[in-house]
Image (cartoon, grey):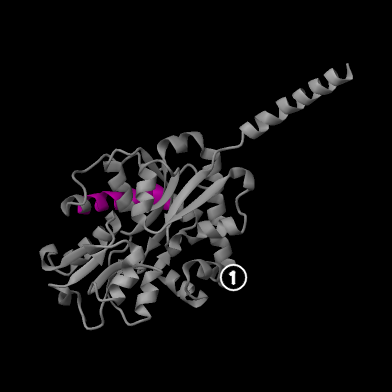
Amino acid sequence: MRKRSTTALLLLCLGLVVPAFAAAPKPLRIGTNVWPGYEPLYLAAEREDWRGSLNIRLVEYPSATEVIRAFRNQTLEAAGLTLDEVLTLREAGIPLEVVAVLDISSGADVILAKPEYRSFADLRGRTIGVESTALGAYVLTRALQLNDVEFADVHVVHLDVSAHLRAFNNGIVDAIVTFEPVKTKLTSVGARELFSSREIPGEVVDVLVVHTETLRRDQRRLREMLAGWFRALEYMQLEPLAAARFIARRLKITPQEVIKSFDGIELPDASQNVQLLNQDLPKTLERLQETMVGSGLLRERQDIHDLLESGLLPH
């Protein structure tokens, strides 16, 4: 009788415990490539701004190309991407929505050249390396347009960002379309900046994009994740050197170089995000789409009225 009672009690306890384990959420996987503007995500994880029960997993890839592929294949629930990359995914039929503006590049995306090339016009007939993503192509397209240089005037080779340093230093390319922290590493050895995102203000915007299905089923965790992001931004304001030391270890540059790299990156707070998503970004998207269609980066205009979702931002 005692054995039966003990067995029954054990089964009852297991019955209570098993559902608790079964209810644990699957990881919310957020993909990024290496870029200072995404570092507040890793800072939030380091500072434990997200409770462990949220099961948020950051996945870092060597290049934006791989982030896009992983998001397209649904091995990520969310990702840090640029607006032009989001439009490319939307055209491919991927149901997705933008839930936050992470950063705006105002000088951190650049075209760097060997020191002997003193102007963009000097790159006619030269080899330019660029990552085979929408962003790389977009920055190069805008630079060519603004400097009255045709695509036919330059030789373009596609290089993942992991190969940018080697290709530039070994003379494989005369110029490279790149971004921080590669920008800092190359300018420190004499590379000359011929173009930057400062010349196309508000056009290079990094956002957090999620699958529409993820947005429907996982709003609580997405809200908590964004709250942690904004707490990390506040920490960077209050403790810039401590934050820079952490980021420096990840980017393999000095804390001083980290602080300098953020000179070319704007990090909108929660209230600025509300304004951007509800008022500014719809106009930016329209201009961006028009430019991308005109330059052949998109086949045709799309309906983008439902692309932006500000409801998860802290109020």
Residue 243 drawn above or below residue 51: below
Residue drawn at (14%, 63%) of the image: 151
The residue that mark 1 highlights is 242
Please, which residue is most extreme toward the right here? 2
Left or right: where does residue 297 sit relative to residue 163?
left
- Residue 246 drawn at (x, y percent): 56, 67
Please, which residue is most extreme toward the top here? 1
Residue drawn at (31%, 45%) of the image: 89
Q: Which residues are magenta?
A: 275-291
Of residue 298 and residue 23, the one placed in the foreground of this image is 23
Q: Report the amino acid beneath label 1.
A: Ala
Residue 283 counted in the magenta span:
yes
Residue drawn at (47%, 49%) of the image: 30
Left or right: where does residue 162 sit relative to residue 115?
right
Secondary structure at numbered mark 1: helix
Residue 67 drawn above or below residue 7: below
Considering the whole magenta stretch, tell me its main secondary structure.
helix
Q: Quadrant of residue 198?
A: bottom left
Residue 22 counted in the magenta span:
no
Q: Quadrant of residue 300?
A: top left
Residue drawn at (32%, 82%) of the image: 190
